[in-house]
Amino acid sequence: MRTFDMTPLYRSTVGFDRMASLIDRALTADNASQSYPPYNIEKTGDDAYRITLAAAGFSEAELSIETRESQVVIAGAKGDVQPQEGVEVLHRGIAARSFERRFQLADHVKVVSASLEHGLLHVDLVREVPEALKPRTIQIATGSPKAAIEAQAA
């Protein structure tokens, strides 16, 4: 039994539609197409993250990184690989296919940089929470609240 019906979850939750659709998408995704290319997600600081994707054989011109609708989309487009003149390939084990990987970003996470080193594509992310959403400490006043209200009214 590999399929789950998420319909009751959609009906019984309000405001959690995004979470339910993420779970639904993860359960129904084709795992074979999602295994290439392999990747790591690393935490490099308190609010810093890095996606490292194995992109061996791809040049910077063949890779693209886009952010759209709280997702980062990494795509690699490989053209037809023609063997060199006079070379006969006996075994082709190095993948030369195009790919597209989507990563769901949490709120306030932004892509800040990307680099390609030794066949690894590094995408650096930072979580920047606006000041209005950061927790703040509220001072507790001492004294009777009735006296404070009377002082304000006068």
Image: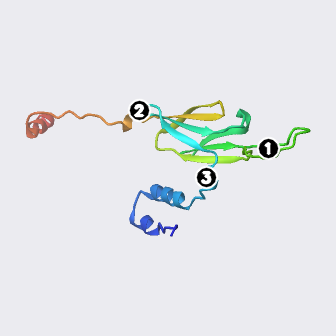
Nearest the viewer among 43 and 127 is 43
| Mark found first going from the N terminus, 3 or 1 | 3
- Identify the disc placed on residue 79: 1
**Residue most toward the front?**
90
Please tell me which of labels 2 and 1 falls first in the chain.
Answer: 2
Q: Against 12, is 123 above or below?
A: above
The residue located at (45%, 55%) in the rendering is 19
Residue 90, image x and y in percent? 82, 46
- Across and down, in percent, residue 10 comes to 44, 65
Image quadrant where one finds the C terminus: top left
Amino acid identity at mark 1 = Gly
- Label 3: few (<14), some (14–19) or many (≥20) C-alpha neighbours in 10 Å: few
In terms of sequence position, does the residue under pointer 2 or pointer 3 come before the other?
A: 3
**Relative to 60, is 14 on the left or the right?**
left
Residue for point 42% across, 57% down:
16
Judged left or right of residue 73, residue 78 is right
Q: CA–CA distance between discs 2 and 3? A: 28 Å
Residue 34 disc label: 3
Which residue is drawn at the image coordinates 39% and 33% (left, top)? 131
User: Cβ–Cβ below 8 Å for labels 2 and 3?
Assistant: no
The amino acid at mark 2 is: Asp
Can see residue 59?
Answer: yes
Q: For numbered disc 1, what is the local secondary structure?
A: loop
Within 10 angstroms of label 1, few (less than 14), some, or many (20 or more) residues? few
Question: Which of the numbered marks, if any, corresponds to residue 46?
Answer: 2
Is residue 69 at all visible to an observer of this figure? no
- Mark 2 residue crowding within 10 angstroms, few (<14) / some (14–19) / many (20+): few
Task: Residue type at mark 3: give it.
Answer: Gln
